[in-house]
Amino acid sequence: MIVPIILSGGSGTRLWPLSRKLHPKQFLNLVNQNTSVFQDTVLRLPKNTSKPLIVCNEEHRFLAAEQLRYINKSSQGIILEPIGKNTAPAIALAALKLINDGEDPILLVLPADHIIEDVKKFHESIEVAKTLAKKNKLVTFGILPNKARTDYGYIKAKINDNSNHHKIDAFIEKPSLKKAQEYLESGCYFWNSGMFMFKASIFLEELNLLAPQILDCCSKSLETEYKDIDFTRLNTSEFFNCPDQSIDYAVMEKTEKSLVVPINIGWHDIGSWEALIETKNADIDGNSFEGNIVFDGVKNTYIYSENRLVSALNISDLVVIDTQDALLITNKSNTQNIKRIINILKKKKCSEVDTHRKVYRPWGYYDSIDAGNGFQVKRILVNPGSKLSLQKHNHRAEHWVVVSGTASITCGKKKYVLKKNQSTYIPKGEIHRLENHETAPLEIIEIQTGDYLGEDDIIRLEDDYQRG
């Protein structure tokens, strides 16, 4: 049995301002209009694999669950990491979880932020790796390079004629351009895809031999696990003690059982604007545009607009990303350095690092339309059959106007229903709840007034989603 392990814990800061801490790149529709790259990863799994096991950050649990539901896919569960500790602990948690459930499957480890154009060849390469994994090998997939890239790690292989797999000589961090060119010309190097295949038991044996502290921390983290809906929560204090290491560093560089399977599948790791732009169709002048763009005299430029008209005149070699609440303008050659902007924003404690204007919740989403001194306006959408927590606020009152759908409302001891164009007032400190019992979405406009309007002014008394 093959169990796909989908690693979904990245933050994707190099794709800011589209990707943000609480809604990172893997959950965005970066390539296909109707599906995120996380959903694409699940949808292209071979039919002969089992349901996937998801590993993601605790903050993204409802994004992952909702996106699976949207594409009518289920999982074996979602393991929640209280903090990101890199790929070795994430994979260890998945392997331990399956072993503890009495299984020893072959794991197909896949990051959730890759693009693969040739799915048929990808499936064929999985069959090659499966044969090797059955022989107790730890297999990684090496991408045949087509240019000298400095933003990818490399695998140096001991090339064995026309074999469909090779022994690994070394793992190499992101090289200089000169070194990358040498690697390309030698024919002995592959891009490190971050995709792996091996038996759960064999991986854990090698981890115990080569990085026992990781195995110990992950084992203790799972000893007191508890189920929360479809989520597996860990012992937080134990997991915080776990070393932060990649599987390459912890195991693959040191084991005697590693092999690489070369593949040419139209692979892209969407880790930067440069990598994403390569997947877009360009015009005769090297431009690619998304959204409402008007331009003249523009060359070798990528412009993305989320909602408004963007006009460009006589510019070249730029990346322009315009979202509802943040604008990025940078030279194409500087897209790898966006973390410098992120660091500045963090120092200024700007909320745009963490959240978008539209914030997704397990019940739907809210969009912060406007704000000023003592007021804030939100557009709130509640999914069919969903409800917000029973809550109250110490610092704000709220006015609700129903735009569409039917709202079931609790306000103090009163329960009542509002329809389109009807409104209500929730006084400061009053216990209240908003519910949608219908089969269509509920949309309201919420006007908040008060001396403090932060999201942390929510005291939850009851919550279907077990949030604090």
Image (cartoon, rainbow, N blue to C red):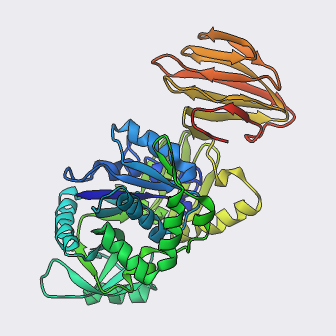
* Left or right: 423 as drawn, with respect to 339: right
Can see residue 332? no
**Where is residue 256 drawn, in percent x and y?**
30, 87
Residue closest to the far left: 162
Quarter of the N terminus within the rendering: bottom left
- Which picture quadrant has residue 6? bottom left
Q: Nearer the viewer, residue 129 or 378?
A: 129
> Which residue is found at the position 44% from the left and 84% from the top?
175
* Left or right: 310 as drawn, with respect to 265: right
- Compared to residue 77, the image places residue 308 above or below, namely above
> Which residue is found at the position 23% from the left and 69% from the top?
264
Residue closest to the far right: 451
Q: Nearer the viewer, residue 111 or 351?
A: 111
> Which residue is found at the position 46% from the left and 86% from the top?
176
**Where is residue 40 drawn, in percent x and y?**
34, 50
- Which picture quadrant has residue 200? bottom left
* Left or right: 165 as drawn, with respect to 39: left
- Compared to residue 35, the image places residue 91 above or below, namely below
Quarter of the C terminus within the rendering: top right
Tally of marks: 0
- Compared to residue 300, the image places residue 167 above or below, namely below
